[in-house]
Image: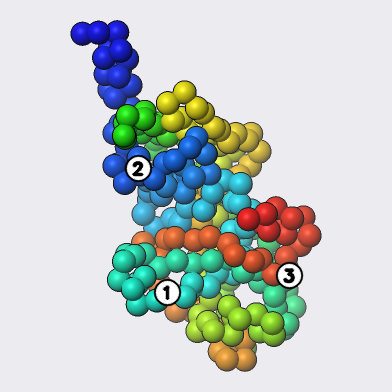
Amino acid sequence: MTKGAKKTSSWASSRKEMPKKVCKKLIGADPNLGWKLAGEMVIKRLLGSDVVPVSCPEDSACFDLGTILVKDHQSLTAKAAHRHTTLRAIGTVEGMSVSAPANLRTILTPKADENWEAPPSGFPWTYTIGNEHDGERKRFYVKVGDVKKEVVHLTLKKGDLRLQLNNNDDLRKAKAVYIVTEAFYASSLKVEVTVDDRQGSFFTEDKILIGFRYQKFKLSKTGVVGPELSTNIKRNRRVYFFSLVAVSSSKAQGCQKL
């Protein structure tokens, strides 16, 4: 076996095989693109199929507790082509409400979920997939620090909360809103993408949101939220942010970059 053949063999055998559709779409050593393509596999293996992964690490704060999501409009063709519904973040409960319970700020204060048991896989937790596509060797690597879960207990009766609909087409068209009420934070996160000799990475040792769950509520034509509706998180897993409205200035600066 030649030297070059040995190197290729080592590359292929040292990690799990990357799904072909992910490998094909992984163009350039971009850690955010790598997470968008493979983050769902990471979260599913680490936290289960009923936790939604953030769209990319740099935008994770845009999906924090109390964030409002709406279903993205899809044409009939798009619905037929995509198995998952796409949700997008448009703001926060506190920033978009015009009437709310007097103790809303207390309700939205995050609390540790003492009953949640961390995954048995141990931390730090690593996940690596690699493959070769059109002659290019591609590798996605992620290392996740300790994971903790925080929640807000949002129990709304009809009339408790009303959202501002003016100048917001997303809400005016929506029949329901999805509010993030469970969040999973990692103590550190490293995402590394390698394409041949090019490498891009994202790394933080600060607490970072990696996944979340939400509750679905009916939304009236006047912006009244409630009652709660059943939903299928395993199906409604794709999220992104479009235009976060009326959020705090510090969060807005980070969430309006794209």
In this image, 28 relative to 171: left or right?
Answer: left
In this image, 238 relative to 91: left or right?
Answer: left
The residue nearer to you, when weighing 146 against 23, is 23
Q: Residues within 10 Å of mark 2 (few under 14, many from 20)?
A: some
Whole-percent x and y of residue 6? Answer: 27, 12
Disc 3/disc 2 C-alpha distance (Å)? 38 Å
Amino acid carrying label 2: it is Lys
> Can you identify the residue that label 3 sits on?
246
Instruction: Nearest to the eye among marks 3 and 2: give it.
Output: 2
* Residues under numbered marks 1 and 2 in contact, where contact means CB atoms less than 8 Å apart: no
Disc 1/disc 2 C-alpha distance (Å)? 25 Å
Disc 3/disc 1 C-alpha distance (Å)? 25 Å
Instruction: Give whichever of discs 1 and 2 has the lower sequence position.
Output: 2
Residue at (36, 70) in percent of width and height: 78
Vertical side of 146 occupied by 171: above or below: below
The residue nearer to you, when weighing 133 against 49, is 133
The answer to which quarter of the image holds residue 247 is bottom right
> Can you identify the residue that label 2 sits on?
24
Question: For the residue labelled by badge 2, is the local secondary structure a helix, a strand or a loop?
Answer: helix
Q: Residues within 10 Å of mark 3 (few under 14, many from 20)?
A: some
Vertical side of 31 occupied by 210: above or below: below
> Can you identify the residue that label 1 sits on?
74
Vertical side of 217 occupied by 15: above or below: above
Instruction: Nearest to the eye among marks 1 and 2: give it.
Output: 2
Instruction: Nearest to the eye among marks 3 and 1: give it.
Output: 1
Question: For the residue labelled by badge 1, is the local secondary structure a helix, a strand or a loop?
Answer: loop
Residue located farthest toward the right when viewing the structure as drawn: 249
The residue nearer to you, when weighing 57 against 157, is 57
Residue at (54, 32) in percent of width and height: 200
Amino acid carrying label 1: it is Gln
